[in-house]
Amino acid sequence: MKLEAKPMTATGAKNKAAEQQELDERFVYKDDDVIDKAFDWKQFTRLFGYMKPYAKQMLPLVSIMMILGTITKLTVPFLTSLAIDRAIAPKVGNPSLSLLYSLTAGVIVLYLIQWIAGVYRIKYTNIIGQRVIYDLRSDLFKHIQKLSFNFFDKRPAGSVLVRVTNDINSLQDLFTNGVVNLMIDCVQLMGITIILLVINWKLGLAVMVTVPIMFFVSTKLRQKIRIAWQDVRMKNSRINSHLNESIQGIRVTQAYTQEQENMNYFDVMNTDSKKSWNKASAMNQAFGPIIEVTGGFGTMILFWLGAYLIQSGELTVGMLVAFSSYVSNFWDPINRLGQMYNQLLVAMASSERIFEYLDEQPAVQDNPGAKPMGTIRGDINFEKVIFEYEKGRAALKGIDLDVKAGQSIALVGHTGSGKSTIINLIGRFYDIKSGRITIDGEDIRGVTLDSLRRQIGIVLQDTFIFSGTIRDNIRFGRLEATDEEVENAAKAVDAHDFIMKLPGGYETEVEERGSALSMGQRQLLSFARALLANPRILILDEATASIDTETELKIQEALKILLQGRTSFIVAHRLSTIRHADKIVVLDHGEIKEEGNHHELTSRDGVYNGLIEAQFRFL
């Protein structure tokens, strides 16, 4: 889902309809539209294919418990009829208390067997269901990890989050109870149908004549129900997306005193979600009255025709009571099957969204025949590289760039000139439209992504700190590093002193994104992380932008050590950061305008000189 923001206007005293219209106009949703298509049986089979690995392990035992419970349930009405016709009100002879006691004991034993079978059936179906959910969630998360940058460029984090959490969770009840209950109800229906026809085929057919009517009416609601639940998922996804953005941008919201506007906007989305849920739920509940009305007609037929058959001698009172019990048990599974179908529609709405992500192929992946890249020396060449984020809008226009191993390259230029694009292409986070990028003479499209990216280290301006300890965050650069290596890396970038002043030193727990640390401290940790990784190619993307001048001076010596022997790319605006680079590349609107070292470029009256003069005017 891609959100395209339009200028925000005051909400004021607008009514809900006007707020909803503004909501639709302000944001354009491109990913989470309702999927309006026919029930996909292939997808249904694919979803339940996740149960296949566990079928041989547990389904035989579950099936035994299911059949045992169904048989005992269907036997109870028969014993009840015997108790009435032979023990309580026999046509011949006196009532028999001993037979009544025996039949009562038999019913108690049957209920006990049914209870035990139910306990074990529920236990094992829950185990199967949770394993299936685990596998599905694991597959989805692993697949998302492999998707390319352009996938995340088009979708807010909240939209991705709702697929892994809400949509997966909505399938839990289907796998833990729904599938087995479906089997039980089908077996029970077949058993009851046979019993009813055996007891009295006339009465059995008369009662079941209402079933086709019920199915005809209920099928009219199915398509609407499925679309309604898809709409609910879409609205929930929108709420999660907005909630994620609101939390991420809470400082900006409070700085501009837009809390009320944000609350009003969320209220509109929340109200819209509530209406969608109410609509889907109302359709869902429509099945119940249909079953009840149909069952009512069936009961009327049962007692009207049953009384006639008793008077004509074709049916006993005990058999009518048993017949009534079987009919009651007949409508219950039909009711549950209707609810099961609704549950299945909800699950299919979620599975469509889950499989949509699972079927998304990474835009950048290993090409057929890709080979692992050996240890990189660091020669990098761009040969007439053209790249587009969007078709028809070139971000790089025929870039030619020759970088020798061990050189430090500074990329400068106005915002949007193509600096970050170049460094993203080195790690092949995007694929170019035309041209070639080679490392040590080898086209990077001919090597595996893992072997390429393992030898590239990146330090970003907005560095990410994970929840965990300081030590773990530094060790993220190389997980097998020892504690001593972690601390040496921190010392090299002058991060050791501030770490030791923290309450737990290297074992200090930091929250998500390192909110307890200053921006400069977070960037120092990212430097230590990159140094520990020991990459052959190092990329610093505005890595010192948020570090104060005093701290920057301290890490200059560490940077000399960090850059030594490595090919490095530095994106920065500070003169102190780039003036010692071996080569400075000046970019403008996706084209290289100038190349040379600081001395060479300042001796010309070119773009680089203009950038320096503009910087000094604001000092």
Image: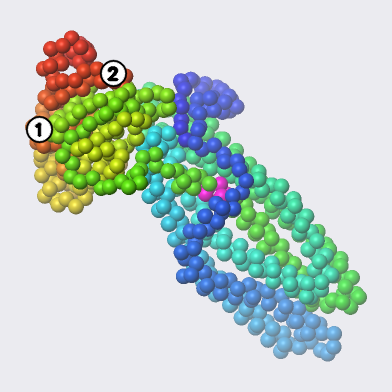
Q: Is residue 512 left or right of residue 357?
A: left
Q: In the structure shown, which secondary structural element does the residue marked by tag 2 occupy?
A: strand
Of residues 295 and 264, which is closer to you in this image? 295
Q: Is residue 111 left or right of residue 309?
A: left
Looking at marks 2 and 1 on the same chain, the residue that comes earlier in the sequence is marked by: 1
| 454 drawn magenta | no
Q: Is residue 217 left or right of residue 253?
A: right
Residue 155 on image: x %, y %: 43, 36
- Vertical position of residue 67 compared to residue 614: above or below: below
Residue sitting at x 80%, y 64%: 207
State whether residue 321 appears in this view. no
What colour scheme governs how the chains and residues are painted in the rendered image of this protein?
Answer: rainbow
User: Which quadrant of the view contains residue 75?
Assistant: bottom right
Q: Is residue 186 left or right of residue 617?
A: right
Residue sitting at x 30%, y 37%: 428
Residue 284 on image: x %, y %: 64, 49
State whether residue 605 appears in this view. yes
- Vertical position of residue 351 compared to residue 407: above or below: below
Q: In the structure shown, which secondary structural element does the residue marked by tag 1 occupy?
A: helix
Q: Count neighbours of disc 1 (C-alpha within 10 A) and say few if under 14, some if 14 to 19, many if 20 or more.
A: few
Of residues 31 and 244, which is closer to you in this image? 31
Name the residue carrying label 1.
Answer: 560
Residue farthest toward the top in the current orientation of the protein:
605
Residue sitting at x 22%, y 25%: 411
Query: Label 2 amino acid?
Result: Asp
- Vertical position of residue 65 compared to residue 179: above or below: below
- Vertical position of residue 239 compared to residue 509: above or below: above
User: Which quadrant of the view contains residue 491?
Assistant: top left
Q: Magenta span covers which residues?
A: 346-351
Residue sitting at x 27%, y 33%: 437
State the separation of the CA atoms marked 2 and 1: 28 Å
Name the residue carrying label 2.
Answer: 588
